[in-house]
Image (cartoon, rainbow, N blue to C red):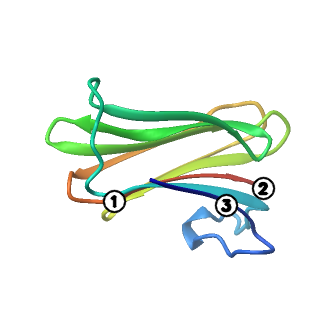
Amino acid sequence: MHVATYKSTEEAPPEFLRGPNGEVPTEWGVATFPMDVEFDSDDMITTKVKKGGGDWNYGTVADGVYKGCYSNYIHPTKKHSASVAIANATDKDIRNANIWAKAYARAGGAHTCNAYWSTY
């Protein structure tokens, strides 16, 4: 698994992290779960961390014959988002301060899951 945090002035975020009015995130992060990830006894991998001044829960889960990819993020004072990308499936949820943003998508198990958080 790979996890990274970026300032948008240092590393341009993926285009789909832009807000609905073209807002560019000021800070963002990504966690990547490769296609060969091994699940624990609960058929899921979940991580809870503090990032960018907020709380981020992300992971991957066995979803029937699929692999699910999720990201949940909350920031107490900033507009923020949670996003995921797996195969051709993406999901993004943008929320105002102090409201959980939640994103989920699924695809076949042979795909890499990318979970993102961002602040605007």
Residue placed furthest toward the left: 65
Against 23, residue 57 (above or below) is above
Instruction: Report crowding for label 3: few under 14, some 14 to 19, many 20 or more residues within 10 A (C-alpha).
Output: some
Instruction: Report crowding for label 1: few under 14, some 14 to 19, many 20 or more residues within 10 A (C-alpha).
Output: many
Q: Which of the two discs, 1 and 3, labels the residue nearer the N terminus?
A: 3
Looking at the rendered structure, which numbered label has been put on residue 22? none
At x 76%, y 30%, the residue is 98
At x 64%, y 48%, the residue is 81
Looking at the rendered structure, the kind of residue marked 1 is Thr
Question: Which residue position holds label 2?
Answer: 120
Mark 2 lies on a secondary structure that is loop
Measured from the top left, where is residue 71 in percent x and y?
51, 42
Measured from the top left, where is residue 110 in percent x and y?
20, 58
Residue placed furthest toward the right: 77
Residue depth check, mark 2 versus mark 3: number of the one nearer the observer: 2
Q: Kindly indicate whether the residue at mark 3 contacts the one at mark 2 (C-beta within 8 angstroms).
A: yes
Looking at the rendered structure, the kind of residue marked 3 is Gly
Against 41, residue 8 (above or below) is below
Question: Which residue position holds label 3?
Answer: 19
Between 87 and 47, the one nearer to me in the picture? 47
Measured from the top left, where is residue 46 in percent x and y?
45, 33
Against 35, residue 104 (above or below) is above
Measured from the top left, where is residue 28 in percent x and y?
68, 58
Mark 3 lies on a secondary structure that is loop
Q: Is residue 117 left or right of residue 102?
A: right
Between 88 and 109, the one nearer to me in the picture? 109
Looking at the rendered structure, the kind of residue marked 2 is Tyr
Question: Which residue position holds label 1?
Answer: 112
Mark 1 lies on a secondary structure that is loop
Q: Which of the two discs, 2 and 3, labels the residue nearer the N terminus?
A: 3
